[in-house]
Amino acid sequence: MTKNVLVIEDDQLLLDFLEENLSTNGYTVTAFESPINGKEYLDNNPVDLVLTDVKMDDITGDEILSYVSSSYPDVGVIMMTGFGNITHAVRALQKGAFDYLTKPFKAKEILFRVNRYFEAGDDFNSRKKIQSFKKDDQAETKEANKKLKEPEQDGIKFVGEDPQIKKLLKILPQIAQSTAPVMIQGESGTGKEVFANLVHVNSRRSDEPYIKINCANLPKELVESTLFGHLKGAFTGAISDQKGAFDEADGGTLLLDEITEIDINVQAKLLRVLQENEFYRVGSQKPITCDVRIIATSNRNIAQSIANNNFREDLYYRLNVFPITIPTLRNRKSDIPLLVDFFISRYTHKYNLG
């Protein structure tokens, strides 16, 4: 059955582009430059998904999202903006948006996001109702946020008073409470793994397994087995059945550190896990279902890795729901004294030097 997509965008060129792109890919598209007209259409016609710009003159995209969420909870919303930031993205997803795109974007990216919504289907709408960011539950959500653990656990602490660091720590609790994938980028030594640990610690999965895989250190021939496990006899040296990282992390969180180092062929199988929540052990034809939240990190220029065919673009789209960039220390030099004091204190205590 053809799905009905309503597009609200006050840039006529982009509106025409979206209408043509989605129509040629099997969707029934109705497009409006005026958000008021789009809202009126929604009230009188069947709609499965709304694509809306965020910044518009008559009615904002946030107002459209609020209206759809309250009046038509079974209709999905994907938001588009040229002025995006991670804080606004988090809030939009909390309020019920399915996805959030920053302009400019390619035709295949918007198509991928729309397809992903319809693949999620009733499952997303059910979770939206259960999580309930409706007004009668907002107080409960705020109260739960107050009880979040401080960003420190077992000596792990994200040290810094720079505004960039404060912003990351401010949005960390909201990101942690979601189950969506997180993509953390930054140079080596910036604290990507520390931030990932804190996301897990402050999540609803904090009491569940937290499995960390350093993809850069895995021999190519063992990557698939390490991630998905294998059956006895699947390859030379497989002397017994072996569980993989997805088995071990079931119900919890899996950190794929330096994910861009994974072989391109294994990336396709990783994409399947994100799409279907199931995987196959090496040597097996029996799918295994799993409930794992993925946090991925990379110190590479991912756009360049994609251009060089070293990293799958569709996998990047799947992972990049919450894009985080950790600033380098040279871009927050005021934090150097704080870090010096922190490490002096930590290692003085650790080696009993005080």
Image (cartoon, rainbow, N blue to C red):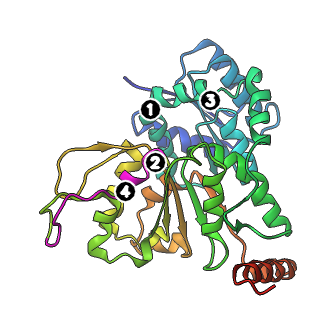
How far is mark 1 from mark 3, CA to CA? 29 Å
Vertical relation: 20 (above or below) 157 = above
The residue indicated by pointer 2 is: 292
- Numbered disc in front, either 3 or 4: 3
Total numbered badges shown on the rendered structure: 4
Residue 122 belongs to the span the image colors magenta: no
- The answer, for residue 347, to whether it is visible in the render is yes
At mark 4, the secondary structure is helix
Q: Is residue 27 left or right of residue 42?
A: left
The residue indicated by pointer 3 is: 131
Please state, as top left, top right, bottom left or bottom right, where the N terminus lies in the image: top left
The residue indicated by pointer 4 is: 270
Three-letter residue code for mark 1? Tyr
Q: Earlier in the sequence, mark 3 or mark 4?
A: 3
Query: Residue 27: which numbered mark, if any?
Result: 1
Q: Position of residue 262 (x, y in %)?
A: 39, 70
Q: Is residue 13 left or right of residue 267?
A: right
Range drawn in magenta: 236-251
Three-letter residue code for mark 3? Gln
Please state, as top left, top right, bottom left or bottom right, where the C terminus lies in the image: bottom right
How far is mark 2 from mark 4, CA to CA? 12 Å
Q: Earlier in the sequence, mark 2 or mark 4?
A: 4
Q: Earlier in the sequence, mark 2 or mark 3?
A: 3
Query: Residue 229: which numbered mark, if any?
Result: none
Quarter of the view holding residue 266: bottom left
